[in-house]
Image (cartoon, helix red, strand yellow):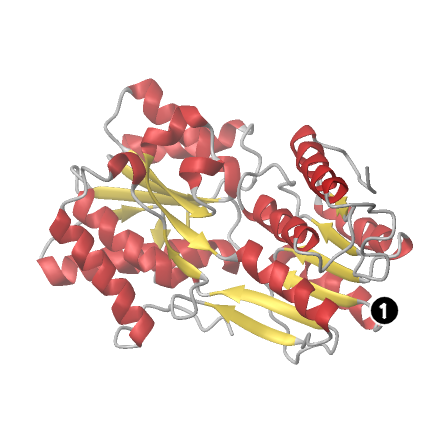
Amino acid sequence: MGLKVRKRSAVIGLLLAFVLVAAACGDDDDAGADGIVACFVTDDAGVDDRSFNAAGWDGVQTAVAEGSANANPILLESDSEADYQPNVEQCIEQGATHIVTNGFKLGATTQQFAELNPDITWTIIDFSYDPDIANVRELVYQTDEGTFAAGYLAAGMTKTGIVGTYGGVNIPTVSIFMDGFTRGVAHYNDVKGTSVEVKGWDVASQDGSFTGTFDPGDPAVRALCEGLLDEGADIILPVGGAINNPCGTAIQDRGLDAAMIGVDTDAFFAMPEALQDLWLVTVLKGIEVQIAASIAADAAGTWTAGGIVGNVANGAIGLSGYHSWADRVPAGLNDEVQQLLKDIEDGTLDAAVFNVG
């Protein structure tokens, strides 16, 4: 069924679906024989993070479904940073022609092996090189544009006047969400003359609340969320895949009328069904589409190296629907949020904290 490391049942099911579709279309023994052999390396959150890594792997599988990559792409999961180098080496040993590395923490390893293997095409998510590397495409995202709008929304929805945020590790691709969120709340306060507080992030010091892990089973994750709830936060933005789940459980166990904000992929669908009513909105990040596009360009011979910035203007950053909260978000507040996004798209409002390009 393909070259895999630490197989997961959900991934196997998805691959089976693609194989069955290919079989229904005819003999797939020769299908894609001269195409791209894709290999995907996760960061240490693993492919089942229901967020960042899951979206990246979906992008590789989309490339397979669209015919730009061979069937049976290689998935190599990292349990720790010590796995990055051997996983990339396995991609090369197993004949990968296009390697996708997922995350800021894989930046150094990707550079090392890309420079040693100039005939392999690489795509890295959430990392930018200066200068660019001739065989690497960098997918970076101005996620603070989305969290700026989400912060404004949260400030308009809080009943306690206190909102919160926490992340897994204080790295730029995590903190940019938290910074945009905090600035969005500040913008709401400026516009409305209110004083909504943000717990968990300080813009001036560029530091805040971090679990130190992306493992949702670590007791530190729930403890950190409990601390924010104790301070009165009733809307919380967790940044780091499934580390939002313990926070949702804590909210439910306390019987609070509170909400969370998701990141990367629509949390209403990506996270456990039991938590669906907690998601106010998700800041969407177009990882899947851009990975599939990079592999497709490689297959078509139109691939180029260098940085591609995903933002509101090009549709790679946005907000999901409100789902269970749709009837609770006032029409006027929604209009203001949508206008913010339009102003960001038009360039009349600069919501970006950092120039990630």
Q: Residue 70's x, y, as percent?
A: 78, 54
Q: Among all residues in the image, which is located at the extreme bottom?
A: 131
Left or right relative to 144: residue 100: right
212 or 160: which is nearer to us?
A: 160
Q: Is residue 327 rendered to the left or right of residue 252?
A: left
Residue for badge 1: 117
Q: Quadrant of the N terminus?
A: top right
- Residue 1 appears in view: yes
Farthest residue, direction right: 93
Instruction: Please tell me which residue is depicted at 80% across the width and 54% down the height of the picture.
Output: 88
Secondary element under disc 1, as helix, strand or loop, is loop
What amino acid type should be assigned to the residue bearing mark 1?
A: Asn
Could you say which is closer to the camera, residue 133 or residue 99? 99
Q: Is residue 291 above or below residue 165?
A: below
- Measured as percent of width and height from the top left, residue 263 is found at 44, 47
Query: Residue 353, image x and y in percent?
Result: 38, 68
Dot 1, how many residues are within 10 Å of its Cα: few (below 14), some (14-19), or many (20+)?
few
The structure residue drawn at horizontal position 71% and vertical position 71%, both measured from the top left corner, is 300
